[in-house]
Amino acid sequence: MPYCPVCLYPSVIRIWLKYWDKYSLNVHRNYFELCLTNWCPCFLLMQGFTSLETLKLESLPDTSMRSIWKSLVLSNLTTLEVNECKRITHVFTYSMIASLVHLKVLKIRLCEELEQIIAKDDDERDQLLSVSHLQSLCFPSLCKIEVRECRKLKNLFPIAMASGLPKLKILRVTKASRLLGVFGQDDINALPVDVEEMVLPNLRELSLEQLPSIISFILGYYDFLFPRLKKLKVSECPKLTTNFDTTPNGSMSARYKVLLI
């Protein structure tokens, strides 16, 4: 396989990395498209990409690839798209979140083995995470989340991170057959039991479609407020127990007829 040229372009701000039947490299101004015939450890070489803003990963096939990166810090990343990476089980680890303060767009599609968007680091797998630890993790700039056709995913984020998305405007989840809730329980002992109502202050659009297993928007004894919600679409979610209704002050709320234990 040709030498991977990733490290030769430290000023690149956009990368599209994908698998194809023929190796190719197309270099444009501050952007390149790299097609790989076999997986190589490109993420080890990407440590020098201090200016990288957009990263698109598509059809990466290696069966040993369970996470997208390890020890990779992309502090200027604003857009991440993960398409048809069928072997990954998670996108981020908790230790990575602190460096992604500029991430604005997250799109995940057709990742068949994806079980979690955020997973514990290897040294945390046998530990219970505290509420304060989870609440310290957030995506302060994230504006748009789209998740489509990830059949093993049961929730998007832990409940304790629900307050860590202050700028989220668009949330779309489609065809995730095992999804139980948008926010779910990561550690049962790490739930914010002193909070009964949570807010996504800037959410404008919420779309939940073709989710046959979803029970509630958030799993637990919590209500949600969406004070700026303008567009709501809920379709083919037969088990959903959430009541979406308007409060007296005009905010949209998500409340529940049945509470999951």
Image (cartoon, helix red, strand yellow):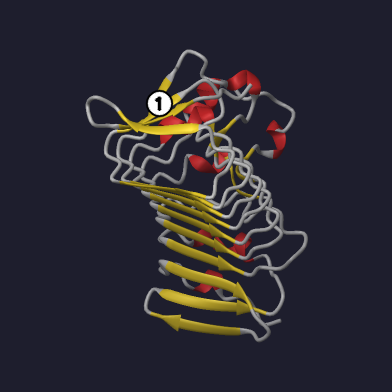
Quarter of the rendering occupied by the N terminus: bottom right
Q: Answer above or below: position of 244 versus 222.
A: below
State left or right for residue 10 relative to residue 157: left
The quarter of the picture where residue 118 lies is top right
- Residue at the top extreme of this rendering: 194
The quarter of the picture where residue 110 lies is bottom right
User: What residue appears at the point 27 percent right and 39 percent down from the top-left corner?
Assistant: 228
Q: Answer above or below: position of 81 versus 137.
A: below
The residue closer to the viewer here, 139 or 234, is: 234
Name the amino acid, label 1.
Answer: Met
User: Residue 5: horizontal and vertical position, in percent?
Assistant: 57, 76
Which residue bears the numbered disc 1?
Answer: 198
The residue closer to the viewer here, 235 or 42, is: 235
User: What residue appears at the point 47 percent right and 28 percent down from the top-left corner?
Assistant: 136
User: What residue appears at the point 40 percent right and 26 percent down from the top-left corner?
Assistant: 198
User: Residue 135: horizontal and vertical position, in percent?
Assistant: 48, 27
Mark 1, Cα crowd under 10 Å, few <14 / some 14-19 / many 20+, is some
User: What is the secondary structure assignment of the residue under circle 1?
Assistant: strand
The residue closer to the viewer here, 17 or 174, is: 174
Q: Answer above or below: position of 14 versus 119.
A: below
User: Residue 166: horizontal and vertical position, in percent?
Assistant: 35, 37
Q: How many marks?
A: 1
Q: Answer above or below: position of 10 versus 79.
A: below
Q: Is residue 52 visible?
A: no
User: Residue 117: horizontal and vertical position, in percent?
Assistant: 58, 46
Q: Is residue 241 visible?
A: yes
